[in-house]
Amino acid sequence: MARSTKQIAGDETVHHISQRAKRGRPKPKMAPPLTPMIDVTFLLLLYFLLTINFRQAEGQIPGSLPKQGTAGISIQDEMKLPVFIELRPTGVINEGVVYEMIGVQGLMRDPQELYDRLMARKKRVASDKIPVVIKSRAGVRWQYVVEAFNQAVRAKFKNIGFAS
């Protein structure tokens, strides 16, 4: 048995603490100081909030529409007017699309036909700088909008935009 020299005032007996009792005591736990860690966290948060750079929303393409009453126009005026391509969904579940060029008779169901009409307009005006505006109605799938864009690029138009 281990003996301790611990003395209690006024007591003549020797008091001791056994090894088993010493092992059973919980050791004092070390806790890291949380205040500096919280300070650093708030400093980082403040840094990122002050240095953030917000961007403009993507997908916003500016464009202008022609004035009303453009019937009976000359070639010079036709060069200034954009080519409007409107896409309309077909069917109940929008499985297809119909292309319509404003000012041109007839609807087109095929992208090749749209390309042919774009080329005819380009030859008539003799310029590739006239704007092409693509407008889709609600329910038209993006693949058809991209296909109309691709046909305008294929016809080598330089100024292609989208209307909302």
Image (tube, helix red, strand yellow):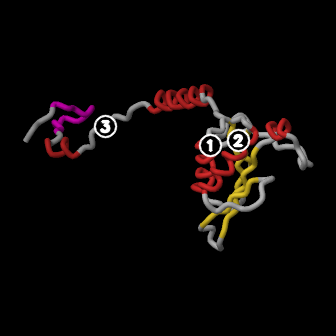
Q: Earlier in the sequence, mark 3 or mark 1?
A: 3
Q: Is residue 139 above or below residue 67?
A: below
Magenta highlight on residue 91: no
Horizontal and vertical percent position of residue 14: 16, 36
Magenta highlight on residue 9: yes
Residue depicted at x 58% and y 43%: 154
Instruction: Name the residue nearer the viewer: 23 or 114.
Output: 114
Residue type indicated by callout 2: Lys
Q: Report the span colored magenta.
A: 5-16
> Which residue lies most toward the bottom here?
92
Q: Which mark, by number, is residue 122?
A: 2
Eye-nearest disc, 2 or 3? 2
Q: Secondary structure at mark 1?
A: loop
Residue depicted at x 18% and y 43%: 23
Q: Do callouts 3 and 1 mark residues in contact (Cβ within 8 Å)?
A: no
Instruction: Name the residue nearer the viewer: 152 or 140.
Output: 152
- Look at mark 3 in the image and give the residue it sits on: 28
Q: Secondary structure at mark 2?
A: helix
Horizontal and vertical percent position of residue 134: 70, 49
Q: Is residue 11 above or below residue 85?
A: above
Q: Is residue 70 left or right of residue 130?
A: right
Q: Is residue 84 above or below residue 28?
A: below
- In three-dimensional space, the C-alpha distance between marks 2 and 1, rounded to whole angstroms, equals 8 Å
Residue depicted at x 72% and y 45%: 121
- Look at mark 1 in the image and give the residue it sits on: 155
Q: Earlier in the sequence, mark 2 or mark 3?
A: 3
- In three-dimensional space, the C-alpha distance between marks 2 and 3, rounded to whole angstroms, equals 86 Å
Dominant secondary structure of the magenta stretch? Answer: loop
Horizontal and vertical percent position of residue 42: 55, 31
Q: Do callouts 2 and 1 mark residues in contact (Cβ within 8 Å)?
A: yes
